[in-house]
Image (cartoon, helix red, strand yellow):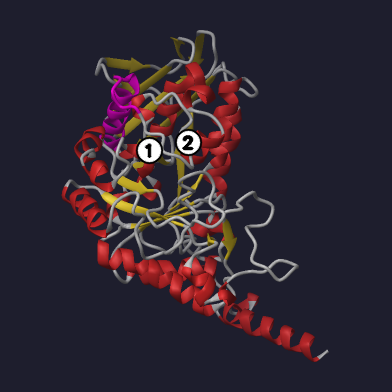
Amino acid sequence: MRRALTAALALLAAAAPIAAQRPPLNQRTEADYTPRPYVSLTNAPWVKDAVIYQINTRQFTKEGTFRAAQAQLPRLKKLGVDILWLMPIQPIGVKNRKGTLGSPYSVRDYTAVNPEFGDKADLKAFVDAAHAQGFHVILDWVANHTAWDNKWVTQHPDWYKRDWHGDFHPTPWWDWTDIIDLDYSKPGLRKAMTEAMAYWVRDFGIDGYRADVAGYVPLDFWEGARADLEAIRPVFMLAEWKTPDLLARAFDATYSWQWYETVEGIAAGTSDATALYGYYSENEKAWPKAGMRMLWIENHDINAWHKTQFEAFGPMLDAAITLEMVGEGIPMIYDGQEACNPKRLEFFEKDPIVWSKPCRLDALYRDLIAFRKGHPALANGKWGATMVKVENDKPKQVFSFVRQQGADKVFAAFNFSKTPVTVTFPTTLQAGRYRAFRTGQAVTVAAGQTMTLPAWGVTLLAGS
């Protein structure tokens, strides 16, 4: 009884500040119902039109080092990307290691560098060179678990969760046998983890983090860590997770697995273009405008364990990339995509990308990135325009929308089918004078206009 009473009093105490902010119902005015912003964090200004580029350091170059990656910065600058996301840079656990080299997500020491990639001086040189060329650099951060032989295992065994035997254990239900779970009920762990994150931001100039399985770590930890990092410098935080609560005070962006799965389903023929209506409706109504959802065609998980971009999208690939770049969301490129990398890269072994062959996707990405940066309506998050559906008479095949901000207007129509289609747009929303993507040709679109799109074809127009 005493325990139940104590718990009830604790709940009342937690609720009291909220109740105290609200006068009795019969005394309230309209001002008391003024909506409060869901997102209270401040995005760094350099996120406005940023494109993320994920670097799998082990496979990014033949050498697989920071120094070799640094030599590629001018090429990435020409591509037009902005935020460089380095997969985990820390030493990898040896105990219960998978494969020869192990998974970079099995961290042995949070404040050290994997000698496979170089040393701390090499990392600092990479970050400094990236900053000098206008990039920002974020690190992959693995807060949910550590390697079996992380130094905390012997120094602070109480920081780890235990199974029903009382032993350390991997994350439940997964086959992550090379790691063991941390216990975030321990204040000491929270302090040490936050200090480790602050170390790279303070001493190496890191500009933020991508948080691995972020939802497996308590949200209040991330919110506290974000505040502590912001006290050092403005940061960008990306969560590998799928709920909007992480965007309120902790993360600038979350993953959008739903977008990938929806677009892949269209490519596979298991759904049609109308499947995107559900995604974008939810995106507009259930997610904060000031938050961002990251879109991708490949990432390290998709490439290693699922499909390459060619396997997943086939002839629809160029159209899917175009939607990623001009629809709402912050886009991400996984290294090797622009080189038409045809293989699933090994995850626990050395398997470098082959960069020698020319690839049409390099030019497509460069042109699309330049296009989106040239049009304020296509900016990320709170800065960009909401997508507005353009009605058409072939909705199962054609997905069409306008994004308009002030005088800047972008009209896009995608034929997400394997046959050519002649489509009519009956409304006035899309009407206007435009320039065509890539060609710059002047195009006038009238209300009720009909156009023909080839199989998997895209019409992308911009006007002002």
Q: Position of residue 239 (x, y in %)?
A: 48, 53
Q: Position of residue 315 (x, y in %)?
A: 48, 16
Tell me if label 2 and label 1 are in contact, CB under 8 Å: yes
Determine if the magenta segment contains residue 368.
yes
Q: Main secondary structure of the magenta part?
A: helix
Range shown magenta: 354-375
87 to 325, vertically: above or below: below
According to the picture, the residue beneath numbered tag 2 turns out to be 346
According to the picture, the residue beneath numbered tag 1 turns out to be 59
User: In which quadrant of the rendered image does the C terminus lie?
Assistant: top left
Please tell me whether mark 1 sits on a helix, a strand or a loop.
Answer: helix
Asked where in the image residue 121 lies, by quadrant, the reply is: bottom left
Q: Quick one: label 1, few (<14), some, or many (20+) residues within 10 Å?
A: many
Q: Specify whether residue 415 is in view.
A: no
Q: Nearer the viewer, residue 57 or 307?
A: 57
Q: Position of residue 360 (x, y in %)?
A: 33, 19
